Amino acid sequence: MSELAAPYDMTLTAVRKHVGVLVDAGWVERRKHGRVVICRLRPEPLGELETWLTDRRTFWASALDRLGTALDTDLATHESDPR
């Protein structure tokens, strides 16, 4: 684990906690071989994340397009009002 922590300005304990969160989420597999802890990225859950992000992107793009249309309509209504 110290090799994994070396490039970061973090304590070994902090890196262990971060890796633990990734293990709990199913994104990283951790196993011990003697005194060495081997961590391996599990790419399968990243596909689920990509799907979720795509769904969110689609939702927000649509919502923001509707908001833009409503604002344009409101602005056009106010601009054509002679008051």
Image (cartoon, rainbow, N blue to C red):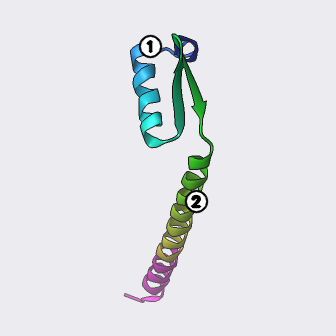
Q: Crowding at label 2, few (<14), some or many (≥20) Cα neighbours within 10 Å?
A: few
When the figure is inspected, residue 33 is found, relative to residue 69, above or below; the finding is above
Looking at the image, which residue is at 60% across and 35% down? 41
Q: Is residue 11 visible?
A: no
The residue beneath circle 1 is 12
Looking at the image, which residue is at 63% across and 43% down? 43
Across and down, in percent, residue 51 comes to 58, 59
The part of the chain drawn in magenta is 68-83
The residue beneath circle 2 is 51
Amino acid on which disc 2 is placed: Thr
Across and down, in percent, residue 46 comes to 59, 47
Amino acid on which disc 1 is placed: Leu
> Is residue 77 within the magenta segment?
yes
Q: Is the stretch drawn in magenta largely helix, strand or loop?
A: helix
N-terminal of the pair, mark 1 or mark 2, is: 1
When the figure is inspected, residue 79 is found, relative to residue 12, above or below; the finding is below
Q: CA distance from mark 1 to mark 2?
A: 33 Å
